[in-house]
Amino acid sequence: MRLRPFSLALASPLRTAREELTEREGFLVAVGGPKADGEAFGDARTTGIGEATPLPGWTESLPACEAALREAAAEPTRQGAVLADLDARETPAARHGLALALDDAAARDAGRSLAAHLAERVRRVDRSELPEPAGSVPVNATVGDGAPESTAAAAERAVEDGYRCLKVKAGARTLEEDLDRLRSVRQAVGPAIALRVDANGAWNRSSARRALDRLEPLDPAYVEQPLPAADLAGTADLRAASDVPIALDESLAERSVEAVLDSDAADVLVIKPMALGGPDRALDAALRARENGVDPVVTTTIDAVVARTAAVHVASAVPDVLPCGLATAELLSSDLAADPCAIDGGRIEVPDGPGLADGTFDGLL
């Protein structure tokens, strides 16, 4: 098992609940793939690559991620035990890096794509009806929180580029200002374009109720995280009182997938593989959501190209997946390698060679 630290500058600063980030730091992980179930991951024929890029507020810290990975690298043991240890340490980004590397190696050994490998594992367990992964996945374009004119212009450009689903940031301004922005977008793009509103937990219960009432005439596809992440009870009440669908994102950083589904607070779950601990965990969460009548949307934590590509594979294994938040490469000013997932007409292509991208990333480690 080998590690390579990296740091990539963001195209513009990212504000989280704790700090403002100007770069994304993490580790590339390379391992030998398993030759058979349960064999030590250091003894295999094929090298697999993964990425561990922690994000404050969503995963462990960068030092905790590094410590977990270096301890795993120094301890020759079976892969299941190592992954279980990373679970116990509550280091999802570290687990993501190792689990992805192992699955990439196993998929390459089997001569199939990562998506097909993940889907086959699911079929073997209890979901034999899962279809073959899709060759491309619909994606949304994200529109920032500018003035009404600039927001509408950005939305129009995205539609001209082929996007049929837009996510508009809200919550940083007053409700009236946000409503003006969203009306301008709806007027600019027309009723056929799906419009998502992301409040990032900025509203309280009373302002969220007013917001959903005022937004309903604009026919939003959903409002994402209208209340703070921990307020599942308030979100459930809000959902019961409104016809506007609700998506939950940050709540999955506070509560388990099971707790969020049990709360009856969401129509949509936003699934982040890095925050959940790996592509395998993300696909399982997406399918569990679907079984509970909740739609999954797969997105990234502003990852580098290796983890972004893995998220595309996860999304392609979800049948009839809604537009996903995977068009995030432009949020980085540079990357580790060329992106193998082209975006055209509002859809992102899924690499169909063995593993993540048929050896595209082999030179990184």
Image: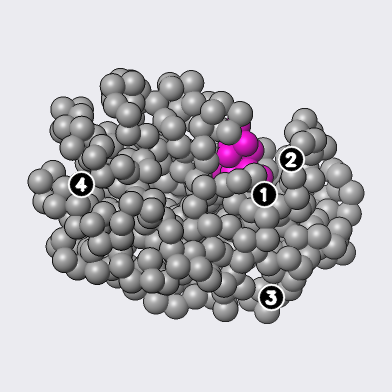
Most foreground residue, 92 or 81 = 92
Instruction: Identify the residue position indicated by label 1 in the image.
Output: 317
Nearest to N terminus: mark 2 or mark 3 = 2
Instruction: Identify the residue position indicated by label 2 in the image.
Output: 130
Name the front one of labels 2 and 3: 2
Contact, mark 2 vs mark 1 (Cβ under 8 Å): yes
**In the image, residue 304 lies in the stretch drawn in magenta:** no
Most foreground residue, 294 or 70 = 294
Label 3 Cα neighbours within 10 Å, binned few <14 / some 14-19 / many ≥20: some
Q: Quadrant of the image for the C terminus? A: bottom right
Instruction: Identify the residue position indicated by label 3 in the image.
Output: 360
* Disc 4 residue type (three-letter): Gly
Instruction: Identify the residue position indicated by label 4 in the image.
Output: 171
Badge 2 element: loop
Q: Position of residue 16 (x, y in %)?
A: 30, 52
Nearest to N terminus: mark 2 or mark 1 = 2
Nearest to N terminus: mark 4 or mark 3 = 4
Secondary structure mostly seen in the magenta stretch: helix
Q: Which residues are magenta?
A: 276-288
Say left or right for 99 vs 92: right
Badge 3 element: loop
* Disc 1 residue type (three-letter): Ala
Q: Which residue lies at the image location 13% right of the left edge and 44% below the top edge?
A: 175
